[in-house]
Image: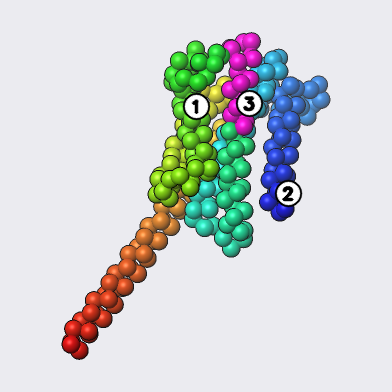
Amino acid sequence: MKTFLIVGALTVSVLFLMVIMLVLQTGSSLPFFGAFNSFLSLDSTQIWWYVTRSAGLMSYILIWLSVVWGLAVSSKIFDPLLERIFTFDFHEYLSLLGLGFVGVHVLVLMLDQYQPFTALQILIPFIAPYRPFWTGLGVIAFYISLLVTLTFYMRSMMSSKLSRAIHMTSLLAYFGATLHGIFGGTDASLPFTQIVYAVTFLITLFLVIYWLMVMYFRKRESDQKALELARQRRKASQQMRARA
């Protein structure tokens, strides 16, 4: 029940945030909204363009949040505060929600009349008419994210080592999505999106370094325990031979 309430609250919050972004991007005659126009470049007149911009940014934020949440779970940062079953379920839900917004982002591109995309241009990397390389990176990032998410439901069919290896590729998906947004996104030059990309990248970098340190010390502790156990066994074996 607790998980359901938190997940539901997150969904409502994300949808509410997307609505707010759409309202801001459609503009208003009020001075308050006018101030946002120069900050967010809210000068387009196509509703599909508003939707795909908002969905693209929301999908990036959610995929990033899924990645950093996974790093935090692996580092056991939340263990003193939250049950691990919740942290795993929430990680899975963030991935699904992020993929959902990616779906909205790419499908709406086909409805946009200014720069329409075909299904093949969306599904096949590097053939899009608009910035093909950076758009292609976004397509590949989506496929990696989809693969990682599918492993949530295929864990019983693969080894834990393989599952962890596939999950590590989510970092590649995040960096691919970041490059796609920075060099392929039309809002990349805006102060708002630059702040988003900078903050999310710095947080990710910190958590990756923290996770690597945690893994290093865990391995060193495990090696020390294994060495001590081997010493105890060797000592016990020597004592048995001495008695014989």
Question: Label 3 sits on what residue type?
Answer: Val
Mark 1 residue element: helix
Residues drawn in magenta: 100-116
Q: Looking at the image, which is closer to me, 146 or 26?
A: 146
Q: Residue 226: give its label.
A: none
Q: Looking at the image, which is closer to me, 114 or 218?
A: 218
Q: Residue 5: give its label.
A: 2
Query: In 3D space, how far apart are the residues under numbered discs 1 and 2 (Cα atoms)?
Result: 32 Å
Question: Label 1 sits on what residue type?
Answer: Gly
Q: Number of numbered discs present?
A: 3
Query: In 3D space, how far apart are the residues under numbered discs 2 and 3 (Cα atoms)?
Result: 24 Å
Q: Looking at the image, which is closer to me, 78 or 86?
A: 86
- Closer to the chain start, of discs 1 and 2, is 2
Q: Is residue 106 in the magenta section?
A: yes
Query: In 3D space, how far apart are the residues under numbered discs 3 and 1 (Cα atoms)?
Result: 14 Å
Question: Label 2 sits on what residue type?
Answer: Leu
Mark 3 residue element: helix
Q: Give the residue at x 67% y 23%.
A: 51
Residue bearing mark 3: 104
Q: Is residue 109 visible?
A: yes
Mark 2 residue element: helix
Residue bearing mark 1: 138
Q: Give the residue at x 64% y 14%.
A: 112
Percent across and percent down for residue 69 are: 55, 48
Q: Looking at the image, which is closer to me, 4 or 189?
A: 4
Percent across and percent down for residue 175 are: 46, 35
Percent across and percent down for residue 151 are: 49, 41
